[in-house]
Image (spheres, rainbow, N blue to C red):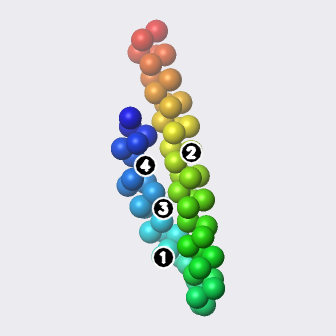
C-alpha cells in the first residue's frame, strides 16, 4: 500500500529531474526521451515495490518476532 502511495510523487520527481537535465537539441532526440520515459517509470515502480516490500518484511520480522 505504501509503495502505491509513494509511486506518484517519486516518479514525478524522477521525471522532472530527467527532463531538467535533458540536453535535447532536436525533435528527434526529444522523441527518443519520450519513448524511454515509460521504461523509466517501470524501473521506478519495480525499485519502489522491491525496496518497500523488503522494508515491510524487515519491520514485520523485527516487530512481530
Q: Residue at 42% of width from left, 11% of height from top?
A: 64
Q: Residue at 36% of width from left, 44% of height from top?
A: 5
Q: Measured along the vertical axis of the image, is residue 61 above or below residue 18?
A: above
Say the numbered circle drawn on residue 35.
none
For label 2, the crowd category at 10 Å Cα-Cα, with few meaning under 14, some 14 to 19 and many 20 or more, is: few
Q: Measured along the vertical axis of the image, is residue 26 above or below residue 47?
A: below
State which tag comes first along the sequence, 3 or 2: 3
40 left or right, relative to 7: right
Front position in the image: 37 or 6:
37
For the residues labelled 2 and 1, the Cα–Cα distance comes to 23 Å
Q: Quadrant of the N terminus?
A: top left
For the residues labelled 3 and 4, the Cα–Cα distance comes to 10 Å
Q: In the image, which is nearer the foreground, mark 3 or mark 4?
A: 4
Residues at discs 3 and 1 in contact (Cβ within 8 Å): no
Q: Position of residue 36 (x, y in %)?
A: 61, 67
State which tag comes first along the sequence, 4 or 1: 4
Q: Position of residue 23 (x, y in %)?
A: 58, 83
Q: Position of residue 53 (x, y in %)?
A: 50, 31
Label 3: which secondary element:
helix
Label 1: which secondary element:
helix
For label 1, the crowd category at 10 Å Cα-Cα, with few meaning under 14, some 14 to 19 and many 20 or more, is: few
Q: In the image, which is nearer the foreground, mark 2 or mark 1?
A: 2
Residues at discs 3 and 2 in contact (Cβ within 8 Å): no
Q: Measured along the vertical axis of the image, is residue 61 above or below residue 5?
A: above
Say the numbered circle drawn on residue 7.
4
For the residues labelled 4 and 1, the Cα–Cα distance comes to 20 Å
Label 1: which residue? Answer: 20
Label 3: which residue? Answer: 14
State which tag comes first along the sequence, 3 or 4: 4
Label 2: which residue? Answer: 46
State which tag comes first along the sequence, 3 or 1: 3
For the residues labelled 4 and 2, the Cα–Cα distance comes to 10 Å
Amino acid at each position: 500500500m505504501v509503495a502505491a502511495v509513494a509511486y506518484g510523487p517519486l516518479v514525478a520527481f524522477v521525471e522532472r529531474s530527467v527532463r531538467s537535465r535533458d540536453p535535447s537539441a532536436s525533435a528527434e532526440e526529444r522523441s527518443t526521451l519520450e519513448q524511454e520515459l515509460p521504461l523509466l517509470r517501470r524501473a521506478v515502480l519495480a525499485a519502489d515495490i522491491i525496496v518497500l516490500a523488503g522494508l515491510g518484511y524487515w519491520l514485520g520480522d523485527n516487530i512481530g518476532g
